[in-house]
Structures are given as C-alpha cells and as structure tokens.
Amino acid sequence: MTTSLIDRYVFTVLRRVPEGQRSDIERELRTSIEDAVDARVDGGQDRAAAVKQTLLELGDPDRLADGYADRPRYLIGPVFYPAWQRLMVVLLATVLPIVVAVMVVIRILEDATVGEVIGSAVGTALTAGAHMVFWVTLTFAVLERTGVTRGELRGRAWTLDDLPRYEPGFLTPAQLAASLGWVVLVIAVIILQQFAFTEVPVLDPANWSFWWPYLIGVLILEGVYAVWLFRRGAWSRTVAVVNAVLAAMVAIPVTWLAVNERFFNPEWIATLDWGGTDPLAWLTGITICVAVGGALYDVVDVAVRAERARRGLRTPVPGTGREFSAPLS
Amino acid sequence: MTMDATLSGHLQELRRGTVVVASLTVLREAGYGYSLLETLSAAGFEVEANTLYPLLRRLETQGLLTSEWNTEEARPRKFYRTTEQGDAIAAALRDEWARLDKAIGDLDHPAGTDPRSEQ
C-alpha cells in the first residue's frame, strides 16, 4: 500500500525528466525518500504516516521534475517579455485593424450584403488575431529556449544611441522603417495588381508607357526623402517645401488621370456590378478625395511642424505628458 | 501584501545562493542527499529537499561536484564530493559573503559610531 504511494510519486517525477537521466534520478530519489522515511520511523512515527509526511514535504512532483530537468517554468521570460509585449500591441492595435479594413473593402467590392461584410470582418479579426498571437508567441518561446540573448537578437549591445531623440524634427528608426515600408508596399501593389489579385489588372495598363513608371519613380524619391529627413534630424522650411513638392508630384497626376478616366482599367470596371450605382464615378470620386485629402494633410502637417520647430515652440512628447522645446537654430 | 509576506519574500531573495556555498563547503567531505539535508538544517539553513536534490545534480553538471554510487552498504547511495574547481568557487563565494557582511555592518554603523559605545 505505502510502497505504491512512493511508486506513484517517483513515476510522476520521472514522466517529466529527460530519458537519459531517468534511471539515475529514480535510484537517487528512492534512496533519499527511504532515508527520510527511516529517519521519521526512528523518531517514533508510524511508517505509513512517515511516507505521507515525507512525500508531502517533497511537494509537487512536477515542480521537482522541472528542477531536475533544469527547464524554465515560464513561456517567455523577462529578457524577451518587453519585445514580445511591444510587438503584440503593434500587431493587435495597428496591423490587425488594417487587415480587417482591407478585408471589409474587398468584400464590399465583391458586392456582399451588410451581414456578410460584418461576418467576414469578425471572422478575419478572430482568425488573423489568433494567428498573430500564436506565431509571435511561439517564436519568442523558441528563442527563450534556444538561449538566444537580447544582445544577439539586436546584433549588438544596447548603447546610448538607441535612446529616441524626441525632438520633433527627428524621425525615430521605427518611423523611418514605416516610411520605407510604405513606399515598398505601394510599389509592390502597383506592380503586382498587373499580374495578381484580380483576373484583369485594376489600374489602366495603358499608363505603363509613362505614368505608372513615373509614380514608382516619385515613390522612390519619397523613400530618399525619408532617409534624408532621418539623417538631417530637423524640420525646416526646406523640408516643408520638398515635402509639398513630392506630395504634389503624386496627387496632381493621380487626380488628373482619375478625372480623365484613365486611372482604372476599363476592363476591370466592366467586371464590377454594383446594381444601380456607377462604379467608375464612385471609384473616381474616392480616388480624388484620397489623393487630394492625403496630400493636403501631409503638406499642412509638415508645414506646421516646420513652423513650430522654426519658432522654437514647445512640442508634446507622445506618451509622456512632457513637452520638448527645440533650441532655436 | 502583508508585512509578513513582504518579509518572507525579501528573506527568500537574501537566502538564494547561500545553499550553494553551504553545500560546496559541507561536501568537501563526501556526503549523500539526505545526509546533506540533515547537516544543512542542523546548521540552520532552511533548505527544502525539492530544491536541494536538483541543485546537487546541477552543480555536478557544472563540474563543481563529482558523484559516485556507493553500493557497499545495504542501501546504495549516491555520494557527492566537491571538486577542486568547486572548492575554488566556494572560497570565492565565502570571501564575497564576508565582504558583504562587513559592508552591511559598516552601513549600519558608520565609522565613528561604535555600537558598543552606545550601550
């Protein structure tokens, strides 16, 4: 009866111990338990009670096994937790809404009912969200267990240069990466829509003779501008003017093409059936609004920042409740 | 958190690591798991079997202890002994312990305020 209690305890420990160490750990653990039981019996205790007491003191067998196996009792430890948490927030608060919004637009273009749109929005949010959480967590758990340190992950140790500048003129490395990523994404969409996504290209293929290569060229200039701004590290009138010129170089041709019905591929427009409404008129309107509105917002935003920096006005540092006042230059 | 829980948390933090020094010091003479547990608790170390047994194996993998099965007696036991390297590390740890003890004493009674003169 009592031996079976020890057996049950020992077997439970062995289940979670590496196979190569099992027999040695079993022998040692059994003698240690017997030694402790004998000591209690010598002290006048009943043997059955001594066994129970000894095993109770040894405690949770899974915990003991983890001690023997020397494995962490957590999924993601303190070294990786901050990076995991930041990535999780970005993915769930920024990327997931974008994915859901794109899905909703696609479903609306596919002429879905309101119920279907809501259904696929909820479905996408749950599926994409679960994928994001799962794969990111799995990656970090693997990193945790393969003994990669934070320094190796970054390629070098943390230095003072890693501190954000917080001055309004400075792009953070993350903002630079976002700007460049946006440029690459838009260029990829322009090129890929010709070959993928839909059976016929969305944008008018006739413009490959000039306007689409031109737009790709301007987008590359936007990337160069972001790198220049990142290195320059200060807003100024020059920056505001360059930014405005670049914005106009995108917005004016796009608007002109849309107005002249040369933006979308007529063949693709012909495949759309939106009931009573005219798809071309709507899409043209939306395109002009996005092009003009986006450009105006960008121009005004940068001009205001440049003017504030020029006057040395105090600028709030996001997320701190503090203000930074730029030195007059 | 109650005062007791706070205290026991800090005590645990403070005691972490002392079992290693104590074990390496005691095992300069070979001993087995349960005997070491008895010696340590008699010496006033609050150590639990479920931390000590895995710790011995860990110190062995680090090369600070060697082990040998003694099958001459009725109950075969695994005897551990501190290696030369383990002894060197234990000495360094004891030095550090003494240094910390002195440093804390100095903080508690800054130079010039001899605790004996206050009584």
Image: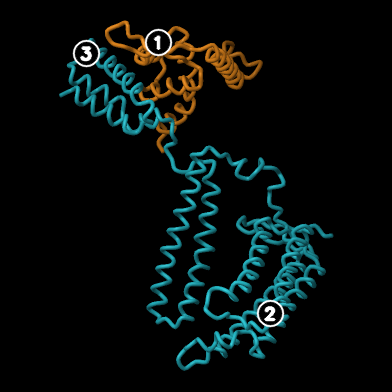
Chain colours: A cyan, B orange
The residue pinned by badge 1 equals: B31
Please, what secondary structure does the residue beneath circle 2 have? helix
Q: CA distance from mark 1 to mark 3?
A: 22 Å
The N terminus of chain A - image quarter: top left
Residue at the spot x=66%, y=40% of the render? A157
Residue at the spot x=47%, y=50% of the render? A137
The residue pinned by badge 2 equals: A208
Q: How many marks?
A: 3
> Which of the labelled discs sits on residue A41, or is there none?
3
Q: CA distance from mark 2 to mark 3?
A: 92 Å
The image quarter containing residue B38 is: top left
Badge 2 vs badge 3, beta-carbon distance below 8 Å: no
Q: In the image shown, does A74 or B70 lie closer to the viewer?
A: B70
Q: Chain of mark 3?
A: A
Badge 1 vs badge 3, beta-carbon distance below 8 Å: no
Q: Chain of mark 1?
A: B
> Could you tell which of marks 2 and 3 lies nearer the N-terminus?
3
Please, what secondary structure does the residue beneath circle 3 have? helix
Between marks 1 and 3 in the image, the one whose residue lies nearer the viewer: 1
Q: CA distance from mark 1 to mark 2?
A: 84 Å
Q: Is residue B98 left or right of residue A76?
A: right
**Amino acid under disc 2:** Trp
Up the image or down, A130 lies above or below A183; here it is above
